[in-house]
């Protein structure tokens, strides 16, 4: 089992040593306006290891680090080990991909639901998306112990890889031509869910073999992404439970 625990490192020296030691980090935050050779070294080390670097207002780092000094640098340790996409493809029947889900509560709820519905993995993009934080771990209610989460550099390239491996790509979109309950969901299945507010990006939509929607009875056009995930994932399970 994975040991789910979020950690925070503050300050140039602790972050540098963590990077040099190869510690699993979710992302590194640098206060805007902070510079110098030591900061440049941290950015280089992080990018060499594929760790996202974000430049945030100093007040955001102050809130994260608390009363201790952070010297303009904070790194967040991953709550669980990320997998590579290639690690989770082999033998998978269902992979859930998230196109920019930024709310950690939504991410955790989707991981929990995906596990309950029988998904083999969840894949998230490296940038402009929630990572595996302690909040995600709590919302997932233990599912991160069992369901692997892959982090991909480019979601569109990940979809191309899945297509090459025989996956059928289904995007959940309110403009979809067919409803989710009229869809057979050929296997292996890749289900793509859009982020809060924007939904699926245009290029991601183009990579989908089918766009499906959830019909709504009222004037509101869409559901919260984690609720929508539950609706469609358990329809997939109903069709493929035998």
Image: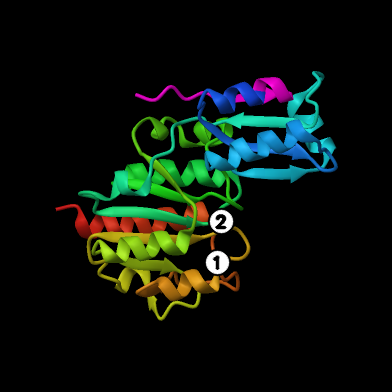
Quadrant of the rendered image containing residue 156: bottom left
Q: Position of residue 147 (x, y in %)?
A: 35, 38
Instruction: Tell whether 71 sits left or right of 148.
Output: right
Q: Earlier in the sequence, mark 2 or mark 1?
A: 2
**Can you tell which mark lies on residue 100?**
2
Judging from the image, what secondary structure is the residue with disc 1 in? loop
On-image quarter of the N terminus: top left
Judging from the image, what secondary structure is the residue with disc 2 in? loop
Q: Residue at (72%, 25%) from the top-left corner?
A: 12
Q: Position of residue 77 (x, y in %)?
A: 57, 29
Queried whether the magenta region covers residue 3, the answer comes back as yes
Q: Nearer the viewer, residue 222 or 4?
A: 4
Quadrant of the rendered image containing residue 167: bottom left
Q: Is residue 6 visible?
A: no
Q: Residue at (52%, 23%) from the top-left corner?
A: 21
Marks 2/1: CA–CA distance: 16 Å
Q: Position of residue 170 (x, y in %)?
A: 36, 67
Highlighted range, magenta: 1-14
Instruction: Tell whether 171 sits left or right of 48.
Output: left
Quadrant of the rendered image containing residue 180: bottom left
Queried whether the magenta region covers residue 224, the answer comes back as no
Q: Nearer the viewer, residue 187 or 164?
A: 164
Q: Residues within 10 Å of mark 1 (few under 14, many from 20)?
A: some
Q: Residue at (28%, 50%) from the top-left corner?
A: 89
Q: Would you place residue 164 above or below residue 117 in this image?
A: below
Q: Would you place residue 128 above or below residue 204 in this image?
A: above
Q: Residues within 10 Å of mark 2 (few under 14, many from 20)?
A: many
Which residue is identified by label 1? 222
């Amino acid at each position: 089992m994975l040991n789910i625990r979020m950690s925070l490192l503050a300050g140039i020296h602790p972050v540098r040593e963590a990077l040099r030691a190869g510690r699993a980090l979710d992302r590194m935050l640098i206060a805007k306006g902070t510079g110098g050779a030591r900061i440049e070294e941290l950015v280089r080390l992080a990018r060499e290891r594929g760790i996202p670097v974000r430049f945030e207002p100093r007040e955001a780092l102050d809130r994260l680090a608390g009363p201790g000094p952070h010297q303009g640098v904070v790194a967040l340790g991953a709550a669980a080990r990320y997998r590579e996409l290639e690690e989770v493809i082999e033998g998978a029947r269902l992979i859930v991909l998230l196109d920019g889900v930024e709310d950690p509560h939504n991410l955790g709820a989707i991981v929990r639901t995906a596990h309950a519905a029988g998904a083999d993995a969840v894949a998230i993009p490296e940038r402009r998306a929630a990572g595996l934080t302690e909040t995600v771990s709590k919302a997932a209610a233990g599912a991160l112990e069992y369901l692997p989460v892959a982090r991909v550099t480019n979601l569109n390239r990940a979809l191309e890889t899945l297509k090459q491996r025989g996956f059928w790509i289904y995007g959940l979109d309110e403009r979809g031509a067919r409803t989710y309950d009229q869809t057979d969901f050929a296997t292996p299945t890749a289900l793509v869910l859009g982020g809060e507010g924007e939904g699926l990006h245009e290029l991601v939509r183009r990579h989908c073999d089918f766009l499906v929607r959830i019909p709504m009875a009222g004037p509101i056009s869409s559901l919260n992404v984690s609720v929508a995930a539950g609706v469609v994932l358990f329809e997939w399970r109903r069709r493929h439970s035998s």
